[in-house]
Amino acid sequence: MFQTSAPRSRLTSAVYIAELIYHNAVRSVRKTHGNAFMAIFMNMLQTVIFVLAFYFMFMILGLRGTAVRGDFMIYIMTGIFLYMTHTKTLSAVMGSEGPASPMMQHAPMNTMIAILSAMLGTLYIQILSLVAILFVYDVAFNPFVMQEINDPIGCMAMILLSWFSGAAIGMLFLALKPWFPTPVQIISTVYQRANMIASGKMFVANTMPGYMLVMFDWNPLFHTIDQSRGYAFVNYNPRNSEWDYALYLSIVLIMIGLMGEFYTRKHASASWAARR
């Protein structure tokens, strides 16, 4: 009540905001479990289960021959890692604290800090899961796995682009959710379930006929997964996807989402909580 605020320089303000984002990102990671290690482990376990489930599904259904020539687990992981990063980021951004949240009653807190914290917390978990799974696979099964990845930097760029596109779509849903809570929740669920197929992680885009390609090429995740396989495998050159489409679409969606979130924040009401 009697506290006086001293003016801060731009550098001090940037450091202060970065510290707020860091602490809130830690909170977003740990809120699934009281123990920090278990919270991270449970998130990593989901990715491991997905990788193993798709591996055995491909083996049982005899679809291994449709994969790109090269290490089969790299083919699986280039699809699963990008899909999990995209979907988890979308859910985290969409579920971040809104303007009517009790957390916004604290003076330094605002919706942008909550959104950035959700994004960075998800990216941290997914990168940690990626490193852990690749380490175990390299040590226990294929000691030359890192040498078989043709362009690791390009693969990492596609993971970041999948993360960014998931955040952009999540921002759009977050801006619309207070106005249309039930329809937006349904659309978000349908989109995430449809991406099990529409992301193209089970197909090789170069082998798809034109009439099937039009059902997939609207999806930014389809482009990033196919491009990541082009970077991972030396003998695969993606012809039916472009990473810049995913980048430009994500920039447009995140700009629309930011404008919508700013408008929603100005009309925030505590009664919105009763509508969800």
Image (tube, rainbow, N blue to C red):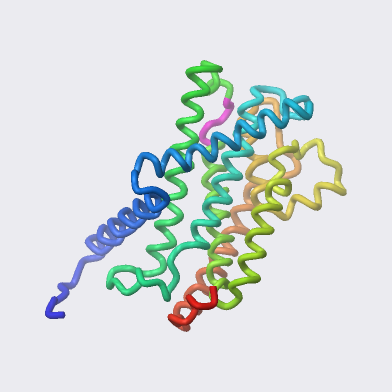
Which residue is found at the position 57% from the left and 43% from the top? 158
Residue 189: give x, y in percent of width and height: 64, 59
Instruction: Report how many numbered discs are placed on residues in the image.
Output: 0
Magenta segment includes 207: no
In the picture shown, does residue 129 fall above or below 249?
above
Residue 219: give x, y in percent of width and height: 69, 53
Q: Is residue 49 left or right of residue 9?
A: right
Majority SS type along the magenta span:
loop
Residue 240: give x, y in percent of width and height: 75, 43
Which residue is found at the position 41% from the left and 41% from the top? 40
Q: Is residue 95 left or right of residue 103?
A: right
First to last magenta residue range: 149-153
Q: Quadrant of residue 276?
A: bottom right
Magenta segment includes 151: yes
Q: Is residue 211 left or right of residue 187?
A: right
Quarter of the N terminus within the rendering: bottom left
Which residue is found at the position 57% from the left and 45% from the top? 84
Q: Is residue 64 left or right of residue 143?
A: right
Residue 193: give x, y in percent of width and height: 68, 52
In the picture shown, does residue 269 fall above or below 122?
below
Q: Quadrant of residue 224?
A: top right
Which residue is found at the position 52% from the left and 23% from the top? 137
The one nearer the camera, 98 or 271, is: 271
In the picture shown, does residue 26 fall above or below 129?
below
